[in-house]
Image (cartoon, coloured by chain):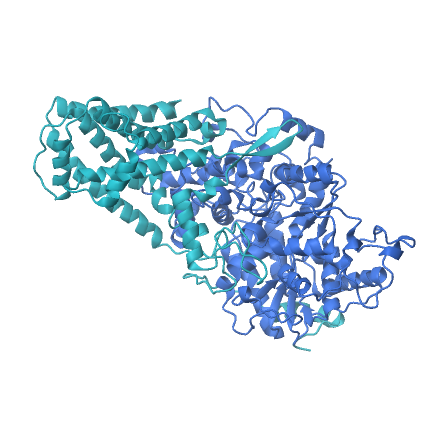
Amino acid sequence: MSQYLPKVDELKKELNEKPGVLKGDYSKKEWWELPFEFRDGNFCWPAKPEVVEELGFPNPRKWVATDEDWKLPDGWQKTLKDAMKERFKKYRTLKLYLDSCVRCGACADKCHFFLGTGDPKNMPVLRAELVRSVYRNDFPMVEKILKGFAGARKLDMHVLKEWYMYFYQCTECRRCSVFCPMGIDTAEITMMVREILQLIGINNNWILAPVANCNRTGNHLGIEPHTFKQNIESLVDDIEDITGVTVNPTFNRKGAEILFITPSGDVFGDPGVYTMMGYMLLFEHIGLDYTISTYASEGGNFGLFTSNAMMKKLNAKMYHEAQRLGVKWILGGECGHMWRVVHQYMSTMNGPVDFLEEPVSPITGTKFSNAKAAKMVHIAEFTADLIHNGKLKLDPKRNDHLRTTFHDSCNVARGMGMFEEPRYILNKVCNSFHEMDENTIREQTFCCGSGSGINAEEYMEMRMKGGFPRANAVRKVREKYDVDSLVTICAIDRATLTPLMRYWNPGVSVYGLHELVGNALVMDGEKKRTEDLREEPMAGFDDEGESDA
Amino acid sequence: MKKVLSPLFIVAVLALIPYVGVEYAGLDYLFGVVIPYMAAGVLVLGVAYRLVDWLRRPVPYTITSTCGQEKSLDWIRQDRIESPSKRWHAVVRVLSEVLFFRSLFRNNKAELRKGPDLVYGSHKWLWLAGLVFHWSLLVIVLRHARFFYYALPWPIGIIEGVDRFLDVTVPALYITDITVLLGVSYLVFRRLQDAKMRILSLQTDYFPLFLIIGIVLAGISMRYVTKVDVMPVKSLAMGLTEFSLEPPERIGALFYVHLFLVCSLAIYFPFSKLMHMGAIFISPTRIMLNNSREKQHKNPWNTPIRFRTYTEYEEEFRDKMKKAGIPVEKE
């Protein structure tokens, strides 16, 4: 095990230590008196100076959270306070959500980081209170007269460190917001704090490096155009080896009907690449006129975890490229935070887009009227429509070697509301789908524990703790139904649930939905299939078992 | 414990002030006329200011919390309340929050058992107590209208009639007097009993609860124990509604305790978390529609940005692109 991750038995012991979710004894203390410390496994590396410089962000320097001196610019308190004031003017949500919390505690045990750590400051109400206490102190309100009474405190180094720690233990998943009687959205507050911390150089390399890459090369991984193309071509070869079918993706092709954009993790990461193979098989199967861009080669948007302006800047490439290539509309791959941006922000930030058309499926003629303005359709909506209209030849038995469950991604669930399409598809492409506990799926789904840009190796201990509620729910369907495959529609999930399962539930693998679609598709001119896209044997398709298939 | 005892102490002092003032200093006019006008003014202007202050700030993005299926393909059933796509869907959503605490009804309780094993149990107590408490308060406030009218408006009459239908004491027992006490007691009890609630509660959470308990106890004592003569109370109340400056007739000090605590609550209201009463009607995650791909939502300050254009990108990678057979704009 790495120095950033305790052995699973140690973590189990820690969780078993005391019954109940809240850990530690707080009878004598107020929450603002509780100590916390940065140590291996509970903080991410700050952004490298050259990355900060490339982005033109303030205060590039070498530092780390455990340093005594964070080398902050003079007057950093004023910078932060001014930045907060400015944002209170721009966002009603911030002011409203800081003002209207009644501390009813309904959110307390809804946060995966609280459930995994037992740390009271991970209760969403207290996470917001970290800011609220400063807000009360520094903003003109009558409560200011009664400072001690209202729980106000000064913005000092202790508070700053607390912010850095706890606003990176929030993945902006918005589960707490579902339960809040006021609809308070902690993600709004987390986004603001992370954004203003950038102004004094408090940052995270796992977020800013992908942002810099995405800006320059078009994708988070920093893959240059030729390599991007090469890698997809190697997937084309793999598809040919496995199925005998040649798929023909095109790159930066003008005049294509549809521009397809997916997270770059699908092009380079394991197991994302199998999902990419699934998309390409699907497009070949229906003869879709589509192209992939090397310039807008990233569906994800780590700008969302950086600042509003950065999110807009990275997102702008999608429409820009769609216009240049002259496509009719954009089809988007499986991803979580990508769809938060595309669904809730894109058309406001970078629209309107009159140069694109209202999306219509060229195969079924279905109008996607729900995407009339943004002109971007989710692949699961697209595929569900194809299946519903009987346009796909599917053999779900080809996934009989898998026993599946489905993980709703936070952003697609609570920031888009897409629950039925992926389930419909999954039920059509496999025979073994079992839901997890109702308190852990759909709008109540748990985060993978590593979303919002904290998917860093050095953060592994926190990730395994934050992912514990999800892993716990998977363990139960594994025990009950022998589930061994966790299906998702998110590239971050594919990257993060894999180590999470290895840690808590060894033997469970992570799949993309369209990987299973790819397995099940009966292609014209295919060779006899015995292996899935991972080149693992399918059940009942070996030489003897084929007869009844 | 300081955070529980100090608000309790403050409420006790607040209750003593009018008692001493009326009983020993004869300040009936101050507590019966001046302070009520002042408190009403602060409440109305304060709440209006806070609401306007919120509403004048923009909501730049559609950030609906989608707690149900979006409107997508025709054959997929949309959850119109939890994923509203039309205005009236959202109106139903917000009203169900306001009237029935819909989101709180979802509440469950996570328990960590040996294993470790996380289990989730239904936990509707907060929802039930919250609902009983708020509805009782509303009914109580409404039936106080009888002090302000010669002839009681019929809707208030119906509410009052239902509230007293048990008819078990003299004067008849109001059911809401009991339920409001049950509700508020549970709300205090849970803050003290649960370790999570103990650590997250502030003095400002206990204070309004204690204040309301004080108001209710003073009110109940007047009606059922000391049986205050309601006629002078009614003439004072009617006078206030007509902006009269007449001094009140002699009423017991207990009444002034009740009234002064109500005035304290009214003055405290606009500057405190009690403003959640207004906030719940305008919470963007609940009032906004989930139609952000269907309709253009406008951000009034949409900051202009400069992004890296395709031309700049091709400039840097042209040779590599050409070698890889990727089409370029400029050969």
Give the chain ID for the cyan colour.
Answer: B
**What percent of the width, then of the height, locates residue A369?**
54, 67
**Which of the 4 image quarters holds residue B212?**
top left
Quadrant in the picture for the N terminus of chain A: top right
**What percent of the width, then of the height, locates residue A111?**
55, 39
Residue drawn at point x = 64 percent, y = 68 percent: A259
In depth, the one of A256 and B107 nearer the eye is: B107
Quadrant in the picture for the C terminus of chain A: bottom right
Residue drawn at point x = 22 percent, y = 29 percent: B258
**Which of the 4 image quarters holds residue A272?**
bottom right
Q: Tell me if B196 is positioned left or right of A14 in this view.
A: left
Give the chain ID for the blue colour.
Answer: A
In depth, the one of A292 and B66 nearer the eye is: B66
Specify whether residue A334 is in view.
Answer: yes
Residue drawn at point x = 34 percent, y = 53 percent: B55
**What percent of the width, then of the height, locates residue A533?**
79, 56
